[in-house]
Amino acid sequence: MDKSKNFKKLVEKLKDRYRLVILNEDTLDDVWYTVLSRMNLIVWLGFIGLVLVALGIILVSFTPLREYIPGYPDGNIRWLYLQNTIQVDSLEQQIKIRDQYITNIKQILRGNETISYTKHSDSITPVQTENADKATFDPVLEDQIEQEEKYNVNISTPQVFEPKVEINKLHFYCPLRGAVTNRFDASGNHYGVDIVSNLNEPILSILDGTVVFSGWTLEAGYIIGIQHRNNLISIYKHNSQLLKEMGNRVRAGEAIAIIGNTGEYTTGPHLHFELWHNGKPLNPNDYIVF
């Protein structure tokens, strides 16, 4: 009973009406007045609080003021996020293209056709390689080659080609002077020419370029591959000694290897030379006089 009486008294107090008056201090006239109760005051304060909370949410959600909240990214950070996402996507595409490019180089080194970038995204099984000791290289011959290169005018004056030049207008250096014993035959999967020459004869780069492969394969022995401008790649197989490493820059006419007889697919000391353009084999006899 006492609890119910106390509750009724509390409700009556909340409903009690009070007059709030603003008076002129000099004349004591009523300037403004209103009638309030405790209940009305609670309701009005709650309503004003809800309005202020709603306005704060709207300002934070739809105005730049949200950038002043600690931990919230500003416009520059979000723009950097977007740019980084685009760059990561571009890098993924470039990595796929690079992997396909390396795969095509391996196919070229094996004497097979390349795979189109647009039709295939998976890589080819890499060429099987095995470790083998390099052939003993005569230091006297090495000194002789270095002495000859000193007076090679083509080494000191690199060739400069425009990015788009017809292949038949380029000046190719002969990689090896000798007799052609086996000619280009695409139908027979022989994508180059075989040249026989003197023992320990140096192999020369046909154009300026960058060494993209320098190593050993079971089928072709010591191989060196050079990337040139105009999407040209030259391949030199069955060498006894490699004079350049992968990543080296070479000039037209510069010695890059020594003629040899390495690998399973060879019947004697010779050079197997291939020329590729845009992933397709070319007949070297159409461009070079051996």
Image: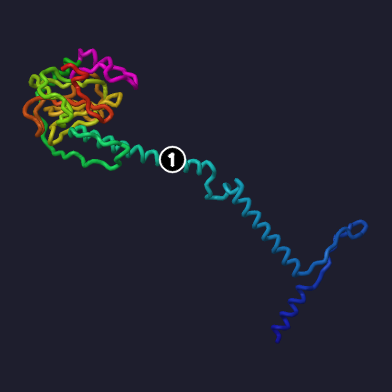
The residue located at (32%, 18%) in the rendering is 161
Horizontally, residue 275 falls left or right of residue 31, namely left
The residue located at (89%, 57%) in the rendering is 24
Q: Position of residue 159 (x, y in %)?
A: 28, 17
Q: Quadrant of the N terminus?
A: bottom right
Horizontally, residue 186 falls left or right of residue 20, namely left
For this rendering, which residue is in front, 70 or 242? 242
Is residue 140 something one can see in this rendering? no
Residue that label 1 marks: 86
- State the extent of the magenta-drawn residues as a range: 150-174
Is residue 79 something one can see in this rendering? yes
Horizontally, residue 80 falls left or right of residue 146, namely right
Quadrant position of residue 280: top left
Q: Position of residue 212 (x, y in %)?
A: 24, 30
The secondary structure that most of the magenta stretch takes on is loop
Quadrant position of residue 158: top left
Q: Amino acid at mark 1?
A: Ile
